[in-house]
Amino acid sequence: MTNEYAIELGLIDKLEDLKYKYREDIRDRAALEKNFREKFDALNRVHLTDAEFARLLDLIVTPDVFVAARHLRERNSFDRDDGTPLFYTLLNIKEWCKNNQCRSHCSRTLTLCP
């Protein structure tokens, strides 16, 4: 077993101890985005077009952890294709204990999924 692999398995074990759920179906970025889109649509009771979803990703994906953290915890908005505003959250901020935690092993991505 390689050292990196052992470290990765140790991290997975620790995250599972923290009640994160391992998702074998999330093996690449496309699967991660598909899962996020499903969770986003359900949480916000909306169905985004492909163009709207691409714009949403452009808005929320940032290397700045402080901006990302603020965006996670606030109510946000953007204009839909038809010009109407969509007010949305990335987490259930009213009933925060109902948020699910999931992660992807292959992409080494840790994410919170509504």
Image (cartoon, helix red, strand yellow):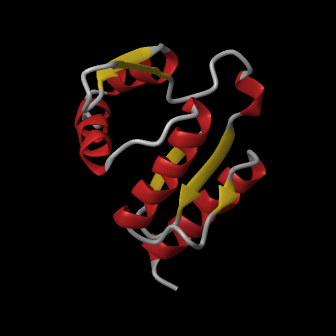
Total numbered labels placed on residues in the image: 0
Name the one closer to the observer, 112 or 7: 112
Residue at screen point 45% across, 70% down: 106
Residue at the bottom extreme of this rendering: 1
Name the one closer to the observer, 16 or 81: 81
The percent coordinates of residue 13 (x first, y second) are 69, 61
Residue at screen point 47% across, 42% down: 47
The percent coordinates of residue 55 (x first, y second) are 24, 37
Residue at screen point 30% across, 21% down: 78
20 vs 56, left or right, is right
Residue at screen point 53% across, 50% down: 38
Q: Quadrant of the C terminus?
A: top right
Relative to residue 94, is residue 60 depicted above or below?
Answer: below
* Res. 32 image quadrant: bottom left
Relative to residue 33, is residue 66 depicted above or below?
Answer: above
Name the one closer to the observer, 79 or 18: 79
The percent coordinates of residue 109 (x first, y second) are 44, 54
Name the one closer to the observer, 24 or 45: 45
